[in-house]
Image (cartoon, helix red, strand yellow):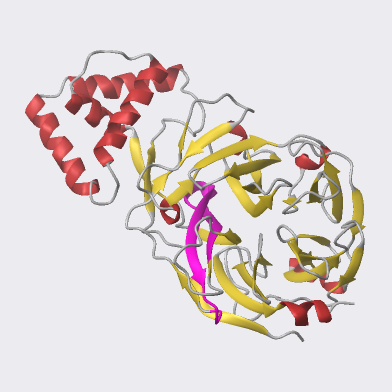
Amino acid sequence: MIEVHKYDLRLTAEPSRVVMRPFQLAQEPRGMNPFQTRRARRIIDAVLQMDPDKAHQLLQEVGMDFSKRHWQASAVHVERYNHLSHMIGFSDDLTLQQRELIGAFFCHEYSYAAAAIMNPSIVPHTDQSGLGPHDQRFVMSLRTVGEGHISSISFREGILTADNELRLRDQPAQTLAAESEEFEEDAKVIALRPDAVPISGLVIFPFTKAQRSGLEDLRLVKFVDDDGEATYYGTYTAFSGVGIRSELLSTKDFTTFSLEPLSGHSAQNKGMALFPRRINGRYAMLTRPDGESIYYQESDDIMQWDGGELIMSPKFPWELIQIGNCGSPIELDEGWLLLTHGVGAMRKYSISAALLDKDNPHKVLARLPEPLLSPSDENRDGYVPNVLYTCGALKHGDQLFLPYGIADSSVSFAMVDIGKLVGSMV
């Protein structure tokens, strides 16, 4: 058995983490139908008919309740009114107080991690300044789940020290949702981190109809192109409530994000993971178009993925139902280290690993014949029991730092010696 050092820290659901979101009279994201438009106008008319002193008192009560819980709550209310007036064609000349109060009626608090936190991914931070020798700052993404089982993307920042100590940055008191520019359905969405909000205080919610039931299982990777330019990419599953598709997040600075649907046969299923550099001058991706095995693909267009070559199928008893990647491969001198997940009897999800050839990643050099991490009596219970899952790990010196989700409910952390891991493969 490979020795795995497990940290005491565990992240769990946090009902107190709330953001201010638009309150729709119908499930969002979608426009209002005539009934909701009439209902919205009725509410607006009631506010406009209020005595100014009564309206002022009501607005003060809203401020006392929520201004300390949210960043620039008044400005958010006004912006919500502006969006609403554009949506329903309401353009009366109103006072600031009226606009702010109307906006408050069409906002609500959403506890984005009240139900669960799971399936982390991790990359080196864009800022590595001010650290000690061999320390490493990181950004970790998390799938957070709130009311209605809506999945969103949140982030945590932290440091791994030279002696493998884990230091998570405290979350700010207030969290904000990413803002979007105008977009059309099935096109690129540009999302922005609001000014003065740290990465650890950002949540990215669904924007489009294809995403409206969740952004699931982001697999982040720091991609370095042939010219040395770095871009952070992340494949994720967009869930509409009816169907799924793979989409791609990209960012240079974790301030401006692009979210765009991927095309091709492989993009119709889950579990795509991009290599951190080009292979043979092309983009390379691990996919699972058949839902049970791992395929290797190359493409000249990062947005288009068709074809592919089968490279790994279920082999061992603990993975007979299906296998898949657990994030982007990590480059070593020995080859590409690939974390995998396998599903066995009683739908038990375990985490394991394989080694791919560095020059020809479609060639599997070796596989770990046993799980690296498997559900145990201590950590098997949760929203979806008997599941361990990760969407990416981080090379830290000669160690592998591995955050992982437990039972679709919480996140724990482990460290593994890479040499011993590779040496245990057959």
For the stretch drawn in magenta, the main secondary structure is strand
Q: Give the x, y percent position of residue 347.
A: 75, 66
Q: Give the x, y percent position of residue 109.
A: 35, 46
Residue at 83% across, 40% down: 299
Above-or-below relation of 388 to 262: below
Q: Nearer the viewer, residue 253 or 66?
A: 253
Q: Nearer the viewer, residue 92 or 221?
A: 221
Query: Within the image, what quadrant is residue 55 found in?
Result: top left
Residue at 29% across, 48% down: 70
Q: Is residue 70 magenta?
A: no
Query: Within the image, what quadrant is residue 104 found in?
Result: top left
Residue at 86% across, 73% down: 317
Above-or-below relation of 30 to 148: above
Above-or-below relation of 349 to 102: below
Total numbered badges shown on the rendered structure = 0
Residue at 60% across, 38% down: 259
Span colored in magenta = 137-164
Q: Give the x, y percent position of residue 198.
A: 40, 53
